[in-house]
Amino acid sequence: MAFLDHVAILQVAVPLLAAPLCVMLPGRHLPWALTLAVSWFTLVCSIVLLAEVSAGGSIAYHLGNWPPPIGIEYRVDAINALVLLVVSGISAVALPYARRSVEHEIEPDRHGLFYTAYLLCLTGLLGVTITGDAFNIFVFLEISSLSTYVLVAAGARLDRRALSAAYTYLVLGTVGATFFVLGVGLLYMVTGTLNIADLAERLPPLAESRVVQAAFAFVVAGMGLKLAMFPLHTWLPNAYAYAPSLVTVFLAATATKVSVYVLLRFVYTVFGHEFAFIEPVLAWLVLPLAVIAMLAGSVVAIHQDNLKRMFAWSSIAQIGYMMLGLALASASGLTATVLHLFNHALMKGALFMALGGVMLRIGAVSLASVRGLASEMPWTFAALVIGGLSLIGVPGTVGFVSKWYLILAAIEKGWWLLALLIVAASLLAVIYVWKLVEAAYLQPAPQDRERVRDMPPDMLIPLWVLALANIWFGIDAGLTTSVAGTVVNAFLGGGS
Amino acid sequence: MSLLGHPLLLILAIPLAGGVLVACTGRWPNLREAVTLVASVLLFLVAYRLMEEIGSGGRPGLVLIEVLPGLPIALEGEPLGALFGCIASGLWIVNSLYSIGYMRGNNEHKQTRFYICFTIAIASAMGIAFAGNMFTLFLFYEMLSLSTYPLVAHKENEEAKIGARVYIGLLLGTSIGFQLVAIIWTWVAAGTLDFEPGGILRDAVPPAILPILLALYMFGIGKAALMPFHRWLPSAMVAPTPVSALLHAVAVVKAGVFTVLKVVIYIFGIDLLAETGASNWLVWVASFTLVTASLVAMTKDNLKARLAYSTVSQLAYIVLAAALASGLGVLGGALHIASHAVGKITLFMCAGAIYVATHKTEISDMKGLGRAMPFTFGAFCIGSLSIIGLPPLAGGLSKWYLSLAAAESGLVIAVLVYMASALLNVAYLMPVVVLGFFGRPDGAPADWQHEPVRLPWLCVLPPCITAVLCLYLFVDGDSVIALLLPLME
């Protein structure tokens, strides 16, 4: 069937083509409706793709029928099918929620432009994930980054600090992307190819080459910036805190995940983790940084008053978990990373959506402003608590599943201290989540605040879809663990 | 048997369904309380039937869902869990009656939330009682911590906030910090988390390391209130008294020591512990907790605080019994779960009744009050005597076996501690009774001295019922012991 043959390209082409169309649409509702339709379409595409590759195969799609290395190849296997599902799934769930939130936070005459930037960002993230061409990754990375700067800056209507946040992100993001393309250029210099599968074949004999090693350094540093690996995280807290709610939901749940995916792809497919120069990098650089991120991110989160910033810092800690699993380079560790890619998207999606609802109702998201709010917005805060418990890693939530594998990986290696540090980071999460719980449930509401109603149903339903997904995939982790298992086999078993 | 009617499923479904119905009927308090009562009676019937089935040798099992490969949420009935489940669900009936009297008598706010959380807590306790593997147990263990948090924080004032913070911090902290690590370690070492008679760790963990793993479990099971992680229990006393009565004398703390026994019997195996001596250090820690908590209890003038420290001490009895790593010890520990449960719930319900009637919380203010509230103080007296271990009350039976186990082990320290603490029990429990009946109030005469005490009958009757239960458990001790005998093998 024609649709099935071309799913891979439609996945990216439809949002790309919808973007210019969106600029031309008048009013506020049409751009939103178009974006919603496109998001749902991409979700269907990624479900189709995941169903095809979950057994362990891969799909190759040659753009314009030009076979690689001349043409660009899209290649889908279990890992990027999962990331595609995360990106399109979060977008599809967030869009119904977006309408009121965007109406509240964005100037009425700019909705078309806002949704255009959003569609481009979606295109970029999906493109980075699906393509099998290293340079093409850079192109899509820039598409998503440039649109993200715009999206973050769109928060300026509510808080002017969004502008400086966007500017910082722009500078650092550009540095990151440039590093990445330098790395890709070096690889092209020594191998003569940009196709990831070809690179993977041609690199092993060149492992001793300084150029290849330099390329690896550039790729890791570049992606480290994009995914906010400690200490390259400085752009993230402000970008998340001051972006419009929809943008924070979407970015927190997807953007860093896509960068983690690219890093996984380069470390495990393109280079191969047993390269003599990569192992020590993972063990002596990435792993300690991941542990520091995990602990420091949580400690800083405890001291935040702005809740969006608090959860942004928590994201830095959670990215530490993902990098830790990646650096452990064992089956359980990688499983933890892959699971956490998915699971963290569910947690942070739910948490930031709930905060977006608070923003809509009371116009602020600080600890002081949510005092006593739980009795007025019970459904929002119940979902917030579920997301928080998941963040802590309470059994029965997705956070537990990731943490299980991460601790398992540490204990399997006999690294007891590491296992204890992981649980210590979870306990730090208890502290900042409980600060929020106590403020919302146990403190009296400030006198000067008017009573508010809970979020409207069209925002609550997407929020609860994510909140319940946190529980569902925590109790029945069969789907996610089987996909993760396929990924790990491909990375550790069939790899170079 | 069809899945829907499976008693192991019902044991979870009844309280949870009760919770949903309570939420729906929140507007009509009488209907709401009827729902709680019906659910508790149904639950007890199912638990009782399960106990009968298990008593006659049955081992019903049910796998609900496989969470991770090889790690299902599985339920399985065995004697220890059957006893715990039966006690907790049976006392839930009595406590539900009492809750009605207490909550209404005190005009407490947010009663619907209170009853909903109660049903979830009971469901969690049932899940712990009938967990088929350590993973399932851990799931329900955390569910119990979280569902009781709103109950502890019920008053929503500064004191409740701080108390609840200590409560959840210590319970979550120990369980995630130590217990989870221990569970994953067990999983890595043994390749399974199923509860199996004789344990799963033989040959899986080197004997020299066993004490460390045991320590991770024992301190990780914060609900057993082993010092220095016992602070949450006194903190939990800010909760309304029905919560202290059922949860912090029965469900939550007993879930803790129950888990201790489960781990000792089915994860480590008594024989393995006895051979390797891995639990010797625990004898000292438990003894220390036992004596220290008793001494602290004597210094407390607040009745509920005194009872809380008494609970810490009584829990250490059971941990000490587990540390003895013998069949008799396990039997004594299991019996003490039951006997302390009925005894302590009586004391708490009496304390609550006193509070409802007079708003007195300090023991020194209760001089002579026994003459005005004879039934309440009578029940308190029986409960105290049972906890002290006087036959023919339930505590006499369990302490008998505990002492036997200590004597059999040949550990002088254990024998001494059990003897000394019985005296300490007398020293901190009997003054309440004696002052109540024979004391002479000092200072200005209180209201209750010149007009009769007004007390809802639902606050008076329940402690009397449980006081009778103290007697019954001794008289019918044979059948309980018969149920538990398979544990000793």
Image (cartoon, helix red, strand yellow):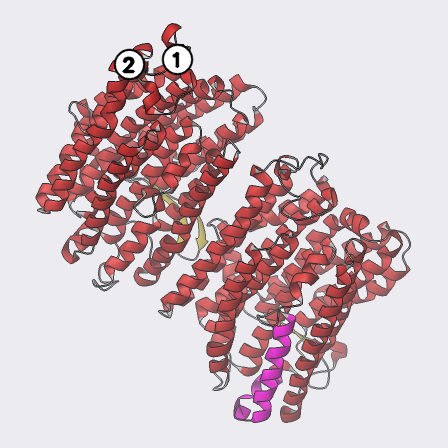
Q: Which type of secondary structure does the marked residue at label 1 adopt?
A: loop
At label 2, which amino acid type do we have? Arg
Q: Is residue A323 left or right of residue B179?
A: right
Q: Where is residue A328 in the image (x, y as percent from the top left)?
A: 46, 72
Report how many numbered discs are placed on residues in the image.
2
Residue situated in front as seen by the camera: B341 or B76: B341
Q: Position of residue A48 (x, y in %)?
A: 65, 61
At label 1, which amino acid type do we have? Ala
- Label placed on residue B446: 1
Residue picked out by circle 2: B440
Residue situated in front as seen by the camera: A77 or A440: A440
Q: Which type of secondary structure does the marked residue at label 2 adopt?
A: loop
Residue B85 visible, this angle: no
Same-chain check, marks 2 and 1: yes
Q: Distance between the residues labelled 2 and 1?
A: 11 Å
Which stretch appears magenta?
A198-226
